[in-house]
Image (spheres, rainbow, N blue to C red):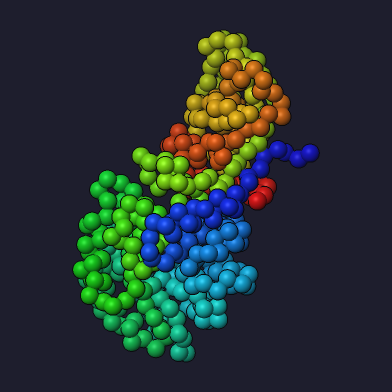
Amino acid sequence: MSRPIQAHIDLSALNNNLHVARRATAARVMAVIKANAYGHGLLRAADALRDADGFALLDVRDAVQLREAGFRQPILLLEGFFSRDELPLLAEYELTSVIHSQHQLDWLDAYPRRHGLSVWLKLNSGMNRLGFGPAEFSAVLEKLKSHRAVCDTTLMTHFAQADEAVGIDAQHEVFKQLAGTQRLPCSLANSAALLRHPQTHGDWVRPGIMLYGSSPFADVSAQQLGLQPVMTLSSEIISIQHLQAGDAVGYGATFRAERAMRIGTVACGYADGYPRHAPSGTPILVDGQRTRTLGRVSMDMLAVDLTGLPDAKVGSRVVLWGEGMPVDEVARAAGTISYELLCALALRVPVSS
Ligand SMILES: *Cc1c(COP(=O)(O)O)cnc(C)c1O
């Protein structure tokens, strides 16, 4: 027997969530699989998402892996190329590149051959992370339209607050001003905009988090959106402890029992990707029943309250998040977002599907 922690990836849930995205839009769906498919495994996720019209990620080596695995869809590099040296690879593997900065244009100008590169020109409409500002955008677009190395251009931008009450109007307005008059394909929407702002769908939507069964909104659950959990992180109780009133739990003794308690030690810690910042009281399932964590999360272990679970014992199954325990709830308790928890799944955790 090895350490009982494992992550299970539900491939049919992933496929279900892709079809939730599909039903919400007439646009083509570019499935975002950056960060090892948000921690789910690049090829495993891409295979379950093979009905997608395209894939978006960051690393050219991952893109090459997808091509070599036989995926024929457009593959978009969301940060574009990082040096001139990558350009031949983009041509060889027919990869699509975001162009967001002048230095990338310079590399393109210096590229010796005709190329046939598909590019997505990024407008910085207000997020101020990547993209050409409104003042430069039109000139760059004119240049790309006649560039010998470029065969087609899609226009894109990214929203900073699509999941929040203020929404996307200001950024959308900037995009429409500059892109609205062009007869070129457009892409604006992440998961939140896909679900809440249909006027932004354009030709390509770019859902990420919703595919993995998590809600992009603080006020709507994944279940309410028809999304199914994809990753279930589970482990087991490996020790039972009995506390007297006044006894403390874990490093720093941050939890102290007010009365006699039975607690369990779970084989899962921050070195597995569980957030160290999850405070006492973070929800967790033991034998399918909700309970709470106690004290600080250690590197390899954490403690759970078994006081109300008399049947729980060494070997009882614990679900950290996933089936029956929404990752969004765990993230909220830990003061973060599901994205961070899913992406942080550690290499040492065995993954099955
Ligand atoms: C990560 C990312 C997405 C996907 O965002 P979600 O909130 O996960 O849907 C879409 N577009 C760009 C440019 C991204 O970087």
**Quarter residue 197 falls in:** bottom left
Q: Quadrant of the N terminus?
A: top right
x and y percentages locating residue 166 in the rendered image? 25, 48
Q: Looking at this view, name the residue that lies furthest to the right.
A: 1
- Left of 95 or right of it: where is 312? right
Residue pictured at 41% horizontal, 71% vertical: 98
- Left of 24 or right of it: where is 59? right
x and y percentages locating residue 351 in the rendered image? 66, 49
Residue pictured at 24% horizontal, 71% vertical: 180
> How many dots with numbers?
0
x and y percentages locating residue 144 in the rendered image? 34, 81
Q: Is residue 255 visible?
A: yes
Image: 159 above or below 256 = below
- Left of 70 or right of it: where is 202? left
Image: 146 above or below 246 = below
- Left of 222 or right of it: where is 48? right
x and y percentages locating residue 12 in the rendered image? 58, 52
